Image (cartoon, grey):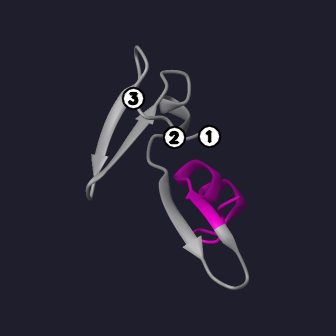
Amino acid sequence: MGLEAVARENDAVIHVDGLIVFVDAVSKPLLDGTEVDFCDTPAATGFIFNGPERCSACGKRGTCGS
């Protein structure tokens, strides 16, 4: 994952609440249905990924994320 100013060829371009996210063609099927959030607390700072496949596999829905 990295910050990009413009989409590359074949990137999916997703607009969410004024934010533009570029997802490459290889990663898109792996991220379908995944919720991305940003956590900024004294205990942790960073992105949190909650994916339906991963959470259903571990049985801890809503607690996955790294």
Q: Residue furthest bottom?
A: 42
Between 62 and 21, the one nearer to me in the picture: 21
Q: Which mark is residue 31?
A: 2
Question: Sequence order check: which comes first, mark 3 or mark 2?
Answer: 3
**Which residue range is magenta in the image?**
46-66
Callout 1: SS: loop
Residue pointed to by mark 3: 6
Residue 47 in the image: x percent, y percent?
Answer: 60, 60
Q: Which mark is residue 23?
A: none
Identify the residue at image location x=60%, y=62%.
48
Residue pointed to by mark 1: 1
- Magenta-span inclusion, residue 54: yes
Question: Amino acid under label 3?
Answer: Val
Q: CA distance from mark 2 to mark 1?
A: 12 Å
Identify the residue at image location x=62%, y=59%.
55
Callout 2: SS: helix
Q: CA distance from mark 1 to mark 3?
A: 14 Å
